[in-house]
Amino acid sequence: MHEMALAEEVVRIVGETAGRAAACSVRTVVLEIGRLSSVEPEALRFCFAAAARGTIVQGAVLEIVEIPGAGTCLACGATVPMDELWGACPSCDGGALQPSAGTEMRVREIEIE
């Protein structure tokens, strides 16, 4: 389950950031996760809670903002919405779509005390 490794890295990043700000605790962590990122949000929530135990991040609320997928057709150049990494272009039926959005995962916001 790669979500555990991702959750551990998020906790590390958030913990270091909170430490630099001399925070006592972290109240909220907002993550942006692309629909095409192959990250399962519910699994990440579970792993986040486990990874945060015993750290300054323990008890923080994890908010996940889903970023829709989009891609560019390599055949016709159209930018189209994507729900999965592979598929045909709805404009020309070409089969080569290059993802341009929705593959990312990043910490967008941290609320500390």
Image (cartoon, rainbow, N blue to C red):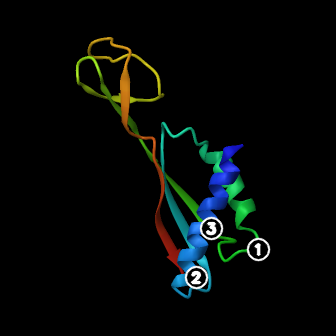
* Residue at the spot 45% in from the left edge and 47% down from the top edge: 104
Q: Is residue 112 visible?
A: yes
Crowd rating for badge 3 (residues with CA inside 10 Å; few <14, some 14–19, many 20+): some
Inter-mark Cα distance, 3 to 1: 12 Å
Label for residue 90?
none
Q: Identify the residue position indicated by label 3 in the image.
A: 12
* Residue at the spot 32% in from the left edge and 17% down from the top edge: 90
- Going from N to C along the chain, the mark reached first, 3 or 2, is 3
Please state, as top left, top right, bottom left or bottom right, where the N terminus lies in the image: top right
Location of residue 16 by image quarter: bottom right
- Which residue is more in the foreground, 40 or 7? 7
> Residue 12: percent from the left, percent from the top?
62, 67
Location of residue 59 by image quarter: bottom right
Residues at marks 3 and 2 touching, judged by CB atoms closer than 8 Å: no
Label for residue 54?
1
- Amino acid found under the numbered disc labelled 2: Gly
Q: Identify the residue position indicated by label 2 in the image.
A: 19
